[in-house]
Image (tube, helix red, strand yellow):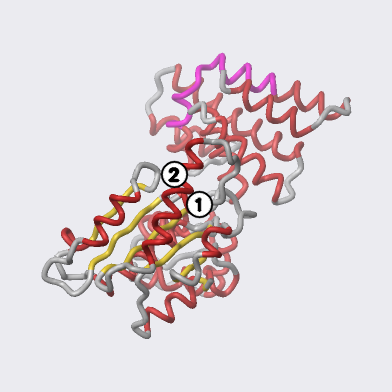
Amino acid sequence: MINSVQFERELAKGKISNCYLFCGNDEGLIKEGIEKLSDKVVKNKFPELNYMKFNGETVKSEDIINACETMPFASNMKMVVVYRANFLKDKKNNKAPSENQETNIFLKIKNYIAKMPKFTVLILYYVYENNREKASRKVMNAGGRACTVEFNKLKGMSLERKVKMLFEKRGKDIGKVELNFFCSSVDNDMNAVKNEIDKLCSYVEDKDITKEDIRNIIIPKNDNDIFNLVDSISQRRIEKALYILNELLYRGEKFTSILSMIERQFKILLVIRLNMEKRLDQDTIINYMKQSSYHLNEYICKKMIVQARSFTVRNLENTLQQCMNVEETLKTTTVSSKVEMEMFIVKAMF
C-alpha cells in the first residue's frame, strides 16, 4: 500500500496501473486523486464516452466488468470509477445477506482484475467511517492485483504546502503566519479546506489575507463539530449526531465541555428563533446577533438562521431545560456519562 504523496509521484513519472483501490478518511483527497488520474487517462479524449461512474451501493459486478470490457472510443484508454464501494470493507456479520452479497461482488471483481484489458483503468474507493479506521483486510490482500492507495488527512507541513498551493490556484498569496493560523483553525478535511478557502478569498476580494479575516470567516473546529451535531439533531439524523459525539470524545473533549458547547448553540438558536417570531428580516437579525454578547459574524449567523427554522421556540426551550437536567445528573450521580449524553441527543430530536 502507498500513500497519496507516493501516488502523485508515480503519476508524475507516468506510471499508471490497470486497477486502483482507494481508501482513507479524506474523500476530498480521494476525488482529487481520481481527477489527476483522469487528466492522464482520458482528458480531451471524449471523456463523456471514456469515463464511466457507478455507485458501489447499487452496482452489480456484471455492470463493472461489462464497462471495463467495452472498448474505448477514439482513445487508447478509458476509466471506470466505482464510488462508495463499501463491498471493499470487511464484513461484520457472516449471516447478514447484504454483507454476503458484498463479499460475492468483491470476490468476482478481485478475480477479474487479473485478466482486465490493458485499455481500462478501474478505480474503486470507499471512505473510512472514522479517524480510527484502517484499510480493510480485503484491500490489503488485493494488493498484488491492484495498486492500493490510502488517502488520509494531511497534517503539519504537508497540509500547509497543500493549502498554499490551493490559495495560489485562486490567485491569492498568503503569508507564513496567516497560513499557519489558517491550517490550525480549519478542519483538515480537503473538502472542508477548499470550501473555507473559497469563502475566505471571496471575503477578502483583492485585499491581503489577515488573521482577523480568518477569525471572521472560519468556524473553530470544535464549534463546527457542535454546529454539525445540532444540525444532525435538527434533521433527526441520530447516527450522524452520535458519530460526532464519539469523535469529540475520541479527541479528548470532556462531557461537561461538550454539553456546555451544545447549550450555547441552542441558546443562540433560541435568540434567533425569537427574533424570527417577531418577523424581523434576516439583515436585522444578523445585525442584532453581531452586536449581542455572542458576536456572531455574518456568515455563521446566516447558517444558524437556516438551522433555527428547523425548531420551534418550545423545542428550543425544552432542549435547554434538558441540557440543565443532564448537567445536574452528570454532576450529582454516578450514571454513565456517555449513555446520558446519547439519551439527551435522542430526546432532543423529538
Write the start and end of the magenta stretch as one range. Answer: 305-322
For the question of whether residue 213 can be seen, the reply is no
Residue at x-position 61% and y-position 28%: 267
**Residue 38 within the magenta-colored segment of the rendering:** no
**Residue 291 position in % (x across, y down):** 53, 37
Q: What quarter of the picture does the C terminus occupy?
A: top right
Side of 52 where 159 appears, left or right: right
Q: Residues within 10 Å of mark 1 (few under 14, many from 20)?
A: some
Please identify the residue farthest to the bottom as the structure is shown.
13
Cα separation between marks 2 and 1: 8 Å
Tell me whether circle 2 and circle 1 mark residues in contact (CB < 8 Å). Answer: yes
User: Which residue is under mark 2?
Assistant: 299
User: Which residue is under mark 1?
Assistant: 216
Nearest the viewer among 137 and 134 is 137
Side of 303 where 248 appears, left or right: right
Please identify the residue farthest to the left as the structure is shown.
74
